[in-house]
Image (tube, rainbow, N blue to C red):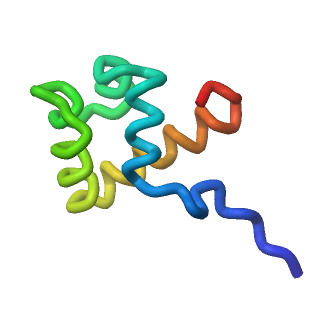
């Protein structure tokens, strides 16, 4: 029996965030994932701190990354 390959295997949260920010910008990220760390004085460091402590927000960011990767936008 084969398992579905995890699309996030080997990809760090930091790499996901850096790639999304480069592709969408902070405004684009804030539109798609409504969290303050993307709207108010955003930075990779502060966003990583928040996402590591907040599972629901991290799940949304990871889902966005997987979705954009599947359609070839990231």
Residue at x-position 26% and y-position 50%: 48
Q: Using the image as rendered, state which of residue 15 and residue 34 is in the foreground.
A: 15
Q: Is 6 placed above or below 47 here?
A: below
Looking at the image, the residue that sits furthest to the bottom is: 1
**Could you tell whether 57 is left or right of 71 in the image?**
left
Q: Is 3 placed above or below 53 here?
A: below
Residue at x-position 36% and y-position 20%: 25
**Could you tell whether 58 is left or right of 36 in the image?**
right
Report the label total: 0
Q: Is 4 placed above or below 66 here?
A: below
Looking at the image, the residue that sits furthest to the left is: 41
Residue 45: quarter of image: top left
Q: x and y percent of residue 21 in the render?
A: 38, 29
Q: Quadrant of the N terminus?
A: bottom right
Q: x and y percent of residue 32 in the render?
A: 39, 27
Q: Is 65 placed above or below 32 here?
A: below
Q: x and y percent of residue 59 in the render?
A: 41, 53
**Could you tell whether 38 is left or right of 57 in the image?**
left
Residue 9: quarter of image: bottom right
Q: Using the image as rendered, state which of residue 71 and residue 23 is in the foreground.
A: 23
Residue 20: quarter of image: top left
Q: x and y percent of residue 40 in the render?
A: 11, 27
Residue at x-position 59% and y-position 30%: 74
Looking at the image, the residue that sits furthest to the right is: 1
């Amino acid at each position: 029996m084969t398992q579905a390959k995890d699309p996030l295997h080997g990809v760090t949260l930091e790499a996901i965030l850096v790639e999304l920010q480069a592709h969408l910008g902070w405004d684009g990220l804030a539109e798609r994932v409504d969290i303050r760390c993307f709207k108010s004085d955003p930075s990779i460091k502060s966003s990583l701190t928040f996402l590591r402590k907040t599972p629901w927000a991290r799940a949304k960011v990871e889902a966005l990354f997987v979705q954009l990767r599947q359609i070839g936008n990231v």
